[in-house]
Amino acid sequence: MRITRYTHSCVRLEHQGGVLVIDPGTWSEPRALAGADAVLVSHEHADHVDVLRLAGLGVPVFAPEGAVLPDLAPLPVTRVRAGERFTAAGVDVTAVGGRHATIHGGQPDCVNLGYLVADEIYHPGDSLHPPGRPVRRLLVPAQASWLKLTEAIDFATEVGAAEVFAIHDAQLNERGLASVNGWFTETVPGYRHLAPGETA
């Protein structure tokens, strides 16, 4: 399965002619959605879902049951729950998790699903909820208001994937990104940074 990373948490997966895009938010490049067959949305925050762009795309969108998406345009949404297995863009997907990680005082308290794609790639959205089974490729959040770097490193180490790629890093400047990449490289076997538009 070919993975192309875009800005922040957006990734594009290509497998056997199908194109599946995860978390194309307002900070990600529109070209990530070119030719997409389906979209997975981890939660309702705009850095993970651009509702207007998806409405214009006209492909199936899978989002957590209970996610509050802006009612700006009609969106062909299929609601999914943690533990549910479904097919998107011809690929088997399992929804994992439940809630967004806490920033402070219990907030935000919104639904968040991670997606295990083809039992191979795991995208946790805005959480560090483990996939519940071994995976070959892990997408690990690198920086967030809700995250300490040591938590991200511990999460990646616990999952133990052969390949680990950072996501959720759009708020880092060059110095911050270099520091985060240095720590991941030093502590997480199989870690590799993909710049936006780079493929693995």
Image (cartoon, grey):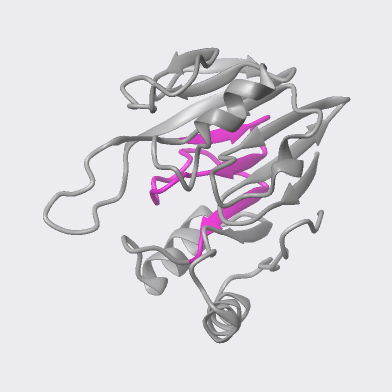
Q: Residue at x 39, y 35 (%)?
A: 44
Q: Residue at x 39, y 42 (%)?
A: 45
Q: How many marks?
A: 0
Q: Nearer the viewer, residue 172 or 74?
A: 74
The x and y percentages for residue 15 are 82, 31
Classify 189 as above or below 124.
below
Relative to 102, 48 lies left or right: right
**Quadrant in the picture for residue 22:** top right
**Quadrant in the picture for residue 23:** top right
Relative to 69, 174 lies left or right: right
For the view shown, which residue lies furthest in the front direction? Answer: 72
Q: Nearer the viewer, residue 71 or 11?
A: 71
Classify 56 as above or below 135.
above
Q: In the picture, which quadrant includes the N terminus?
A: top right
Q: Is residue 122 magenta?
A: yes
In magenta, the rendered stretch is: 114-142
Classify 86 as above or below 33.
above
The x and y percentages for residue 194 are 72, 63
Q: Nearer the viewer, residue 154 or 70?
A: 70
The x and y percentages for residue 3 are 76, 46
Classify 26 as above or below 92.
below
Q: Residue at x 68, y 49 (%)?
A: 29
For the view shown, which residue lies furthest in the right direction? Answer: 17
**Quadrant in the picture for residue 58:** top right
Q: Nearer the viewer, residue 131 or 112?
A: 112
Q: Residue at x 60, y 27 (%)?
A: 54
Q: Is residue 124 magenta?
A: yes
Q: In the picture, which quadrant includes the C terminus?
A: bottom right
